[in-house]
Amino acid sequence: MNTDFNFEELKSKIEFAVKKSFKENIQKYGSDICSFSLISDDGAMTLVPFTNTKSHLEKMQSQDPKYKDFYEFEPVEWFTSNGAKAEFHDLCQTLSVETDKEELDFENFRNIVFETCVQVLEKLRTEGFFQKELGKNLLVQFNISDTNEPKENLIKWTKRLNDKKNGKRYQDYMNHVYE
């Protein structure tokens, strides 16, 4: 790949931003938090944290019970995308500048960015960060908005970031066809 992009630095900055975002949301919403996700886009130019609360999830599911799994597993339907605003803005700027470079092997860059995001979330989950901060387990995801990403990748990532039960539930959701 024709780039001197520092992915280790990116990884450190993502980890810092995720921790800060999660802690800021715990201060606001406390134990009502039930899910956390990082979202990017097909262009690998954005990175946004999403947090869901149990009360928001239950409200959405009660209003439209047919799509209860949709509200649980689709971060764009979650409660908030707040936290570590300056840090995530800087990350988006960094990614945007890099993706604008003509010599960039975009597909390779994109894949490494996405894998880096999953690795950060996986590290935090393995270290127990989310559970220690929240006092309970929660659904953790990496997702891509408006994507043609193979669903197998989304399933694989979610399985890496969660216990077997939530991984299987997400896989069932992704393989379900709504009428």
Image (spheres, rainbow, N blue to C red):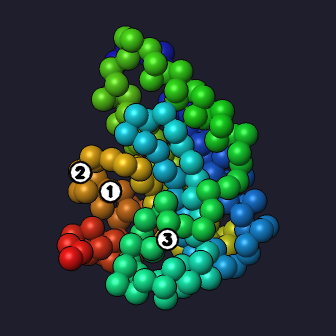
On screen, residue 5 versus residue 27, left or right, reads left
CA–CA distance in space, label 3 to label 2: 21 Å
What is the x, y in percent for residue 106? Answer: 34, 25
CA–CA distance in space, label 3 to label 1: 14 Å
Neighbour tally class for label 3: few under 14, some 14-19, many 20 plus, Cα within 10 Å: many
Pointers 2 and 1 in contact (C-beta within 8 Å)? yes
What is the x, y in percent for residue 168? Answer: 30, 75
Mark nearest the camera among 3 and 2 is 2
| Disc 2, SS | loop
Which amino acid type corresponds to the residue marked 2 in the rendered image? Pro
Residue indicated by mark 1: 154
Residue indicated by mark 3: 139
Which amino acid type corresponds to the residue marked 1 in the rendered image? Leu
| Disc 1, SS | helix
The picture quadrant where one finds residue 142 is bottom left
Pointers 3 and 2 in contact (C-beta within 8 Å)? no
For the C terminus, the quadrant is bottom left
Residue indicated by mark 2: 150
The picture quadrant where one finds residue 92 is top right
On screen, residue 168 versus residue 53, left or right, reads left
Neighbour tally class for label 2: few under 14, some 14-19, many 20 plus, Cα within 10 Å: few
Which amino acid type corresponds to the residue marked 3 in the rendered image? Leu
Front residue of 6 and 79: 79
Mark earlier in primary sequence (3, 1): 3
What is the x, y in percent for residue 146? Answer: 37, 49
